[in-house]
Image: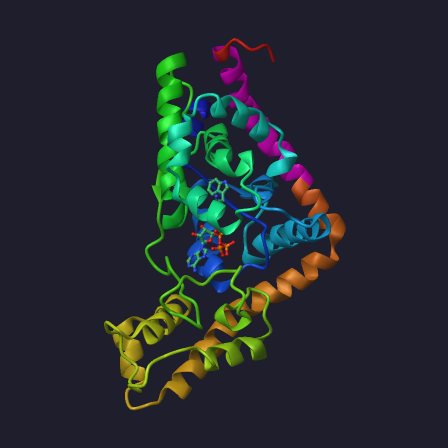
């Protein structure tokens, strides 16, 4: 009886990851981490800091270590709850690297060569086109398949990797018998793309050289308001959502996603007011939304022992789940575990 009940209550599994390659932006928050927090209620969730993925680009060890710990603290500060979600650091769960190798041996050179992220990143880092950059999607496939994830929340830029994950899983299942669940993408409806404040035709990105182009999750309220005040808009002076008004559209989209107001309500509230008032309001609303995150973060960063206990326990729990899949894979491939 109890077992039947447990089976009924099994929720779909969600897994996602984020690379610790700098301070997270408002784009990462609205487009990714905030949704992770909401999803915890209705799904079995697993979230990881994808530090092995970050190694595909050269990193300063000291900076990377700091960024990993900071990223882990930030996701907790945003509301990811280690009691509800598997919350771990990828490199601390060795099964990811182990499965990744096996999947690499089941991924074709041609498939990896077609990945646009590989093409973009090799153009950007022409002096370091390493094998890891090339096989990055096999590691991402391992991340997802180890947990038999049903859904993977990612931005549009990762959909090609997810497609490849499905192709690899389908091939493996065909060759060795059913082993992996086929995951699907889960794309957020609101705030899917927060644009740069300096060039609203470009995505807001943490690696932008212009500090005024992005808001970080940890920016002080004064800084946030100042950056919004400087945001590039147009010369029309009317707050309305329309084609060709990329800057205002972006600010409206941000304002809407932090206040819950519709575009019509925003247009109504700011009718006859200038951009200065609107920018001030957006800045204040974002600063208010991020206030608890910043405060939680400060507290967490000081409590090193708590953080360490969380990521160690997270890795142990994740490894326990991942190991079950890896064991199946070893057996099917003819390896001895
Ligand atoms: P980089 O600047 O290094 O390219 P990034 O800031 O674009 O990094 P990623 O680490 O590639 O961020 O993305 C982490 C997650 O945040 C992904 O799910 C991605 O879709 C989401 N994300 C990143 N930037 C934005 C944005 N501007 N708007 C909405 N979601 C975003
Ligand atoms: N490649 C992703 C981060 C990432 C990820 C994953 C996302 C690594 N492994 C597994 C979802 C599922 C990125 O750069 N945004």
Q: Is residue 90 above or below residue 283?
A: above
Q: Is residue 38 above or below residue 205?
A: above
**Rendering coords of residue 284 (x, y %):** 49, 78
Residue at screen point 44% across, 21% down? 106
**Rendering coords of residue 52 (x, y %):** 59, 39
Q: Which residues are magenta?
A: 312-332
Q: Quadrant of the N terminus?
A: top left
Q: Is residue 11 visible?
A: no
In this rendering, position of residue 309 left or right of residue 284: right
**Visual colour scheme:** rainbow
- Confirm whether the magenta stretch covers residue 328: yes
**Rendering coords of residue 49 (x, y %):** 58, 45
Q: Quadrant of the C terminus?
A: top right
In this rendering, position of residue 34 left or right of residue 244: right
Residue at screen point 53% across, 69% down? 210
**Rendering coords of residue 324 (x, y %):** 54, 21
Pick the residue in front: 133 or 321: 133
Quarter location, residue 14? top left
Count the marks: 0
């Amino acid at each position: 009886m109890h077992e039947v009940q447990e089976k009924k209550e099994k929720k779909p599994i969600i897994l996602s990851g984020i690379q610790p390659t700098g301070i997270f932006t408002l784009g990462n928050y609205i487009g990714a981490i905030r949704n992770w927090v909401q999803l915890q209620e209705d799904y079995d969730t697993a979230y990881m800091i994808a530090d092995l993925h970050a190694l595909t680009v050269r990193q300063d060890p000291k900076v990377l270590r700091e960024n990993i710990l900071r990223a882990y603290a930030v996701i907790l500060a945003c509301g990811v709850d280690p009691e509800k979600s598997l919350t771990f650091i990828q490199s601390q769960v060795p099964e990811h690297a182990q499965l990744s190798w096996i999947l690499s041996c089941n991924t074709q050179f041609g498939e990896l060569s077609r990945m646009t992220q590989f093409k973009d990143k090799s153009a950007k880092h022409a002096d370091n086109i390493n094998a890891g950059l090339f096989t990055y999607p096999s590691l991402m496939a391992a991340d997802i398949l180890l947990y038999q994830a049903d859904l993977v929340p990612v931005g549009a830029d990762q959909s090609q990797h997810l497609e490849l994950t499905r192709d690899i899983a389908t091939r493996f299942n065909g060759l060795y018998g059913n082993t992996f669940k086929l995951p699907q993408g889960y794309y957020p409806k609101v705030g899917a793309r927060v644009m740069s404040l300096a060039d609203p035709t470009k995505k807001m990105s943490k690696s932008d050289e212009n500090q005024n182009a992005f808001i970080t999750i940890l920016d002080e309220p004064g800084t946030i308001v100042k950056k919004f005040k400087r945001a590039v808009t147009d010369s029309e002076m009317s707050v309305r959502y329309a084609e060709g008004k990329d800057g205002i559209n972006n600010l409206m989209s941000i304002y809407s996603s932090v206040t819950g107001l519709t575009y019509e309500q925003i247009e109504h509230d700011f009718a006859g007011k200038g951009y200065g008032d609107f920018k001030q309001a957006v800045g204040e609303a974002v600063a208010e939304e991020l206030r608890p995150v910043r405060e939680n973060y400060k507290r967490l960063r000081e409590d090193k022992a708590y953080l360490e206990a969380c990521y160690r326990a997270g890795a142990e729990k994740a490894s326990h789940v991942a190991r079950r899949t890896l064991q199946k894979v070893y057996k099917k491939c003819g390896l001895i575990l």
